[in-house]
Image (cartoon, grey):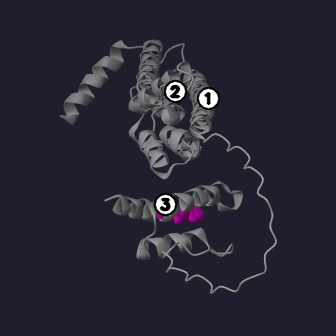
Amino acid sequence: MFDTITKWLAKMAEKVTADQMGYALLGLLGFVFLVSFIAALGNKERRKFKKGVRILVQSGGNNTDGAMKAMPQAVSRAYNRAETLGGNPADFMTHEACVSVPFRVSVMSKLTLVNFCSTVFIALLAQFLMAYYSVTGTVNAPLLVLVCGGVLTVVSAIISAASYRASVRRYNDFVAVLGRAYNDRKAASAPAPASAPAPVEQRTESPVWQPAPAVPAAYPDSRPVVPEEDVVARIDRISREGAPLSVMREVALLLQQERAKPENKTPEQQRRLNEALSKLLKAMSVNRG
């Protein structure tokens, strides 16, 4: 088989000039660029996120359910966690989950690398064919491939960077509308301020000693929390002993505040807080059941 291919290439080399070989390899380079570009545009998760953002923005935040149905599964799950914990959904839609991770695993992020590697490979192939079969002509095929491939690589880098910036702008619009919709719902559901009570006539009476009322046994997590107490330690205690759902919601808000602190943005702290969130969600599901 190898001898057959070699003989066929040798016969082709007798009929093909360096100019023709250079243009053929240049066409191969363009084909690789076109295929990789179409594959990058066809990213399913990217299209779904774009569609969900468009639905949410066009509705002014009123069609949140429709937007989440169109979103990727990771985004809709984050929204469901926010609804379960009673927090602002915008706090759960992190830049890492909505932009960075989807872009890293997409073909768009690898577009520049693919075209660079194909340029080097095809240029080396052109050099090998010209030297092995002694093909001559007015065109330096390896140099032609390197120049055109370099241009395509730069174009790929520009396209990839523009796509990432567009994803960031789309994410910012998404979070802004989502947060505004949450604040509007929260303001609409807030109770009306109570009217001032009527003044009560003050009467002076002699103090009468009465025994202090008995204090009922507190629920495992209803006792006062020491300010210095770590929220993760409190979640561990809730996971062991249980707590009312209202207490769990309060702890969930404290956990979100901890996640937003700059000192907790390290991978180790984020992993620790994510594990605590999983424990809290499990405890809440048991409480609901």
Work out which quarter of the rendered image holds the C terminus and state it: bottom left
Q: Tell me the quadrant of the picture where the N terminus can be found.
A: top left
Check disc 2 and give the amino acid type. Val
Above or below residue 80? Residue 274 is below
Q: Secondary structure at mark 2?
A: helix
**Label 2 neighbourhood size at 10 Å, few (<14), some (14-19), many (20+)?**
many
Residue where numbered disc 2 is placed? 53
- Circles 3, 2 touching at the beta carbon (< 8 Å): no
Earlier-in-chain disc, 1 versus 2: 2
Does the rendering let one see residue 51? yes
Residue type pointed to by label 3? Leu
* Residue behind mark 3: 277
Q: Residues within 10 Å of mark 3 (few under 14, many from 20)?
A: some
**Mark 1 nearby-residue class (10 Å; few <14, some 14–19, many ≥20):** some
Residue occupying the point 68% across, 57% down: 261
- Magenta segment main secondary structure: helix
Q: Secondary structure at mark 1?
A: helix
User: Would residue 250 be counted in the magenta stretch?
Assistant: no
Furthest residue in direction left, as rendered: 1
Residue 265 seen in the current view = no
- Is 100 above or below relative to 17? below
User: What span is colored magenta in the figure?
Assistant: 267-275
Residue 173: give its label.
1
